[in-house]
């Protein structure tokens, strides 16, 4: 096939008519109809450009082609094309509020006589696109003047309506209200036959993040073999290094206990780091990093790029993780600290000042092969093999568990380390990486979701568990019980491990020492075997997030499960209360029933 000669193909003026029609309607169905007609007129080789223009862009979003024209330079170009002064153009702009309308309105009567930009008399969509690419490529000294000159010459060859859209594309203000999904609907109707198949196109779009590529693929295949061929071709759009994949997202649920139900009882729980999501593409020594919005952020994080280059043992790979600012000892810093790394200048200085650690959690592609269709345990297992941890890279902290209590504990441990919650992920066979999807394979649960119960609890300390990590040598958590008045016994409700200040922790041995005992006290009912038992004596006030059924606690027991207080936090010692004045088991049950009635 010989390359198209200038003037061949869809005229820009024809596209303009469609843009006008799209601008006039707000009905989604009408838009799809108009788009499908438009796509029907475009040839496969130009339909990608048509798509970009409809979106007000000149290329796939992730490529970030920068035209580098602000309002002022576009005004200069309009002034030149129309033979008006800058002040006149500014005046019209103040009146109309849109440079597109100004460009249309001012006419060309007094314009430059310099010849137009396009070889063809009637420029095509592709010609105009070439013009914009020339504008984008003009760089270095004198480039502003060059950009103005090109745009002025482009406009001087066009009619009013075309100038309107050219000016809007130049300023990045063409907003027709057409979203990606509407484009995909239009493509489905035009090339596959109906809107029903849009999800198949959407899948491809999520993989390649380029609507133009999807459009060209379906148009070309349709040209050769019709709708079926188009669907087949689009299914073959695969992963490519350097082309960001839309990130998989998590659903959210209010109650952590509902999450385990959704996951059919077994799941991977991971700390949810409050940093910045990164999708890292490695190709030999080259590493590119994409943000959650698919922006290329490599230049902001040369350190992270280096870690991935050095520590991911693969020729090509796509890995995902969350970057966190860390202090010299590797402790996580708050999100705001990391945000100081979002800068254009002084990058190297800030690499030193605010070191970053990348916590990887997923593997999407490895040495020429997509891993997205494998289960999460497979992906994670392979990730573990190819990543050499340390030196700026770790894997996210994870447990795979069937036990709600274990996950609760894991969640709390994370909070103490500075995380903001957990991501619970399916570990079933079908736990694939679903690009761009927000589904139940991942469920996020944050500290902020903890709906605190209205009332606090006064509970009796009946045991203590030895501390780990920074709490080694002191008590890590207190086993606490409510008072069953009818049977005069103490039934465990929770283990309290958070909310203590350093002073509180120091006071604990003094306050509890006199109540120590070697075995389970007579009136205490507990499934848990603490490190140290205490006779009922000390009462503490505790707040919590919710009451649930649990096999490990004993309050209001039914069929082997008692009530448990989830995410309890220590508030203060209640010296004024005796153990028998603690919150009763009956009160706990009433609160539980009350919260069920409210549907929480
Ligand atoms: P979303 O990204 O789901 O639209 P959002 O931007 O508001 O939502 P959050 O609600 O805070 O973010 O939660 C999701 C984000 O948590 C992910 O996009 C990712 O950046 C981050 N994250 C932190 N730790 C993990 C982890 N272990 N696994 C997956 N994502 C994690």
Image (cartoon, rainbow, N blue to C red):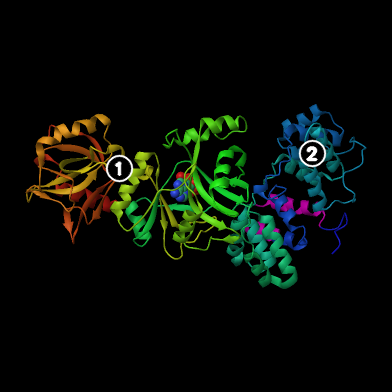
Looking at the rendered image, the quarter that the N terminus falls into is bottom right
Dividing the picture into quarters, in which one does residue 545 lie?
A: top left
Image: magenta residue range = 10-35
* Placement of 152 over or under 491, stated as above or below: above
- Left or right of 503 on screen, residue 97: right
The picture places residue 558, in percent across and down from the top left corner, at: 18, 59
Identify the residue under disc 1: 452
- Left or right of 496 on screen, residue 537: left
Q: How far apart are marks 2 and 1 (CA)?
A: 58 Å
Identify the residue under disc 2: 138
Dividing the picture into quarters, in which one does residue 527 lie?
A: bottom left
* Placement of 506 over or under 434, stated as above or below: above
For the residue pair 539 and 473, the one nearer the viewer reads as 473
Circle nearer the viewer, 2 or 1: 2
Residue at position x 30%, y 42% in the image: 452
Magenta stretch contains residue 27: yes
Q: Residues within 10 Å of mark 1 (few under 14, many from 20)?
A: some
Quick one: SS at disc 2?
Answer: loop
The picture places residue 325, in percent across and down from the top left corner, at: 48, 36
Residue at position x 9%, y 35% in the image: 514
Q: Residue 179 carries which label?
A: none
Residue at position x 61%, y 58% in the image: 239
* Placement of 276 over or under 353, stated as above or below: below
The picture places residue 190, in percent across and down from the top left corner, at: 69, 65
For the residue pair 533 and 117, the one nearer the viewer reads as 533
Residue at position x 37%, y 45% in the image: 449
Quick one: SS at disc 1?
Answer: loop
- Residue furthest to the top in view is 87
The picture places residue 103, in percent across and down from the top left corner, at: 79, 39
Magenta stretch contains residue 19: yes
Q: Is the magenta stretch mostly helix, strand or loop?
A: helix
């Amino acid at each position: 096939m010989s390359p198209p000669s200038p003037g061949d193909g869809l005229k820009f003026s024809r596209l303009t008519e469609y843009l006008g029609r799209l601008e006039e309607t707000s009905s989604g169905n009408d838009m799809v109809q108009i788009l499908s007609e438009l796509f029907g007129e475009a040839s496969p080789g130009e339909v990608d450009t048509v798509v970009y223009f409809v979106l007000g862009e000149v290329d796939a979003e992730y490529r970030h082609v920068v035209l580098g024209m602000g309002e002022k330079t576009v005004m200069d170009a309009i002034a030149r094309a129309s033979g008006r002064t800058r002040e006149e153009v500014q005046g019209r702009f103040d009146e109309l509020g849109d440079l597109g309308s100004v460009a249309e309105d001012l006419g060309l009567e007094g314009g430059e006589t310099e010849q137009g930009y396009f070889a063809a008399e009637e420029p095509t969509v592709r010609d105009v696109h070439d013009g914009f690419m020339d504008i984008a490529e003009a760089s270095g000294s004198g480039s502003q003047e060059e950009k103005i000159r090109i745009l002025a010459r482009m406009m001087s060859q066009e009619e009013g309506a075309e100038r309107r859209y050219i000016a809007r594309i130049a300023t990045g203000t063409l907003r027709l209200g057409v979203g990606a999904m509407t484009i995909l609907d239009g493509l489905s109707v035009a090339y596959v036959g109906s809107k029903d198949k849009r999800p198949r196109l959407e899948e491809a779009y999520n993989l390649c993040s380029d609507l133009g590529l999807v459009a060209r693929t379906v148009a070309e295949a349709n040209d050769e073999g019709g709708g079926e061929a188009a669907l087949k071709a689009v299914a073959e759009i695969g992963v490519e290094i350097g082309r960001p994949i839309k990130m998989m997202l998590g659903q959210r649920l209010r109650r952590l206990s509902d999450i385990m139900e959704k996951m059919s009882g077994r799941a991977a729980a991971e700390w949810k780091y409050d940093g910045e999501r990164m999708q890292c593409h490695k190709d030999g020594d080259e590493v590119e990093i994409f943000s959650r919005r698919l922006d290329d952020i490599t230049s902001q994080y040369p350190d992270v790029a280096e870690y991935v280059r050095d520590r991911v043992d693969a020729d090509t790979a796509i890995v995902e993780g969350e970057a966190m600012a860390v202090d010299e000892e590797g402790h996580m810093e708050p999100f705001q600290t990391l945000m100081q790394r979002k800068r254009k200048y002084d990058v190297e200085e800030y690499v030193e000042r605010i070191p970053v650690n990348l916590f990887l959690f997923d593997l999407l592609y490895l040495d020429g092969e997509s891993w997205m269709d494998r289960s999460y345990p497979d992906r994670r297992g392979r990730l573990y093999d190819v990543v050499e941890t340390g030196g700026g890279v770790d894997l996210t902290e994870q447990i795979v568990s069937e036990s709600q209590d274990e996950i609760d504990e894991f969640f709390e441990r994370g909070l103490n380390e500075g995380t903001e919650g957990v991501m619970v992920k399916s570990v079933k066979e079908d736990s694939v990486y679903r690009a761009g999807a927000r589904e139940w394979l991942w469920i996020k649960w944050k500290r902020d979701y903890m709906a605190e119960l209205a009332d606090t609890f006064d509970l009796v300390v009946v045991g203590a568990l030895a501390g780990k990590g920074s709490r080694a040598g002191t008590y890590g958590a207190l086993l606490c019980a409510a008072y069953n008045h009818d049977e005069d016994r103490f039934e465990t409700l929770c283990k309290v491990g958070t909310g203590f200040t350093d002073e509180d922790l120091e006071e604990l041995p003094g306050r509890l020492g006199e109540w120590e005992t070697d075995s389970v006290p007579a009136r205490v009912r507990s499934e848990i075997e603490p490190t140290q038992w205490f006779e009922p004596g000390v009462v503490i006030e505790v707040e919590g997030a919710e009451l649930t059924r649990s096999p490990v606690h004993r309050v209001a027991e039914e069929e082997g499960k008692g009530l448990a207080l989830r995410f309890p936090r220590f508030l203060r010692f209640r010296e004024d209360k005796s153990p028998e004045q603690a919150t009763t088991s009956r009160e706990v049950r009433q609160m539980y029933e009350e919260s069920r009635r409210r549907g929480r």
